[in-house]
Image (tube, rainbow, N blue to C red):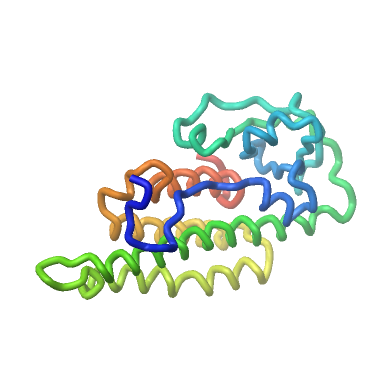
């Protein structure tokens, strides 16, 4: 099913780690670490230039500091790897690097919001053309309200992360908002959300990435 939605905006979900790292740290081989965990692409994991950056603990170089966790089917399909990082391998963070952590959060949340907005546009197109009992699905109030709530939540969340680093309750609030938006899209989509590289897969990736980089602790 090459185009499961009647929308020119449709693209299969693909989480790209390198552009986020490059925008935040100026180098796609620099991977952020938080609370002893990191999410990498398979290419980053195998890179000879790999460097790890933890705003609290320090920095390290090379794969020797990483222990990949057992492969997750959706993560593997996305070319992603969840790794544990040995704290003993981290050195003192270079001066001036801590401000890059906020830039990373801006890029991370921005990338998630871009995918959420893209899917919202796909579903607006889809529900506007698909009919139920002779009327467009978009005319159904529950569908219209779900999609409107997704669009309305985006700008305030983007502004919030731009104002300062997300920590504590602010970070938890951001995670809840991102989950609520993706959940609303899944409920609107129905069974098609289960397609590979689709909304359920997107939400699964976001949950793990946000647990590593935004939430207060790792469950």
Q: Which residue is drawn at 40% across and 48% down?
A: 198
Q: Which residue is drawn at 10% across and 68% down?
A: 133
The spot of residue 107 in percent (x, y) is: 65, 59
Quadrant in the picture for residue 49: top right
Q: In this view, does 36 lie to the left or right of 219?
A: right
Question: Along the line of sight, which residue is nearer the eye, 138 or 174?
Answer: 138
Image spot of residue 218 (x, y percent): 55, 41
Q: Where is residue 85 in the image (x, y as percent from the top left)?
A: 69, 31
User: 27 or 127, which lies in front?
Assistant: 127
Q: In this view, does 113 lie to the left or right of 108?
A: left
Q: In which quarter of the image is residue 103?
A: bottom right
Residue 148 place in picture, x, y as percent: 36, 74
Above/below status of 117 relative to 60? below
Q: Is residue 49 above or below residue 100?
A: above
Residue in the picture at 40% in, 60% down: 180
Q: Which residue is drawn at 33% across and 49% down?
A: 193
């Amino acid at each position: 099913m090459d185009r499961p939605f009647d929308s020119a905006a449709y693209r299969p979900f693909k989480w790209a780690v390198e552009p986020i790292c490059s925008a935040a740290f100026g180098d796609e081989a620099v991977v952020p670490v938080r609370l002893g965990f990191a999410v990498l692409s398979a290419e980053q994991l195998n890179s000879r230039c790999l460097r790890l950056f933890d705003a609290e603990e320090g920095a390290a170089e090379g794969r020797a500091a990483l222990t990949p966790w057992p492969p997750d089917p959706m993560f593997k399909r996305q070319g992603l790897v969840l790794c544990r990082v040995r704290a003993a391998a981290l050195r003192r963070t270079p001066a001036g690097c801590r401000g890059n952590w906020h830039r990373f959060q801006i890029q991370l949340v921005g990338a998630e919001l871009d995918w959420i907005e893209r899917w919202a546009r796909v579903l607006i197109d889809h529900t506007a053309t698909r009919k139920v009992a002779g009327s467009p699905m978009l005319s159904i109030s529950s569908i219209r309200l779900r999609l409107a709530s997704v669009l309305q939540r985006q700008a305030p969340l983007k502004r919030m992360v731009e104002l300062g680093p997300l920590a504590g309750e602010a970070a938890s609030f951001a995670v809840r908002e991102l989950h609520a938006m993706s959940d609303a899209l899944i409920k609107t989509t129905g069974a098609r959300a289960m397609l590979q590289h689709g909304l359920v897969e997107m939400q699964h990736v976001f949950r793990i990435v946000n647990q590593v980089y935004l939430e207060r602790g790792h469950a």
